[in-house]
Amino acid sequence: MTHPAPVDLPTSKLFRLEERTIVITGGAGAVGSSVAKAILESGGDVVLLDMAASAKPDIWKMIQDAAEANSTQASYFQVNVTDADSIAPLFDKIRPTLRHPTRGLVAAAGISGEANATDYPIDIFRKIIDVNVAGTFLITQAVAREMHRSNVPGSVVLIASMSGWIANRGINTAAYNASKSAVHQLARSLAAEWGHPNNTFPGNTIDGTSIPKSEEGVSYPPIRVNTLSPGHIETPLSESARVRGLTDKWADQNMLGRISQVDEFRAPVLFLLGDGSSYMTGADLRVDGGHCAW
């Protein structure tokens, strides 16, 4: 049985997120905190996850002020997204603090690295893949289990990159580019599994990399999974690129002649999380100033 479309919602509700909790990884970062504020202002509660023990005081004050002004709730938990053994206990800790079921995820945790491919140490290459791909999967898996537990539909937004579509000029980031391309495919694959019960096929062949299915025939409300692919973003982390003159070059490579600001990803994320994108899954929303369209 398919899940009904939200055809009777007023237009004013298409971007609203009342009565749902949204988990944000990389929540202490520039993009994560900007998105968190937007979600709070749109009626949703947020759970911020990050490697840091706590958010910077100015960021946390911004988040708390937004929550208070909008009668929403924000909480913060420390996590290493690659530590599989810690994630289930973390969600056991989070669950009792929530006012509303978890119905969304913004997976913004990620790292980059720069090196010529012939010189790339394999341990650093693996670390980038581990954080950006395996870490994204582990948190997405945990959030999907929470949605199944609550028997609610949801929306997952994986922050990918235009670098999953193209190779960047002026900087050698083979591991990062490969990881973001993998995030695109991960999203498509998860969207296929979680969109409709008929998409999960009976049985599977058991071998060294396969395991028996645990819930044959169990149906859950749909979880939509999409990616958001930003272009170059102006953040504190881009300062070294600016010093090298790279940001000016990147600005010349897109159709708007500038790199983006973190606040420009608020509306795309709200669109993907909310019911306004109810028929969108397995897709990539590229917000790159036209960089990839030349």
Image (cartoon, helix red, strand yellow):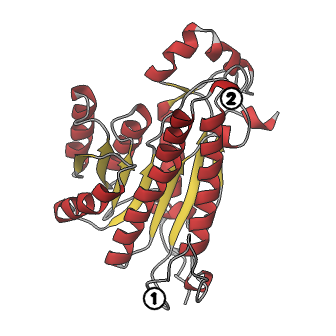
On screen, residue 132 versus residue 120, left or right, reads left
Q: Is 64 located above or below residue 2 in the figure? A: above
Q: Which residue is mark 2?
A: 117
On screen, residue 3 versus residue 72, left or right, reads right
Residue 68, located in which quarter of the rendered image?
top left
Q: Disc 1 residue type?
A: Val
Q: Is 284 located above or below residue 33 in the figure? A: below
Q: Secondary structure at mark 2?
A: helix
Q: Is 21 located above or below residue 52 in the figure? A: below
Q: Which residue is mark 1?
A: 218
Residue 110 drawn at (x, y percent): 47, 40
N-terminal of the two: label 1 or label 2?
Answer: 2
**Badge 1: residue crowd in 10 Å (few <14, some 14–19, many ≥20):** few
In front: 241, or 156?
Answer: 241
Q: Disc 2 residue type?
A: Ala
Name the residue rendered at 43%, 42% in the picture. 109
In front: 62, or 164?
Answer: 164
Residue 55 drawn at (x, y percent): 25, 34
Q: Which of the labelled discs sits on residue 288, or is there none?
A: none
On screen, residue 26 versus residue 177, left or right, reads left
Residue 83 drawn at (x, y percent): 35, 51
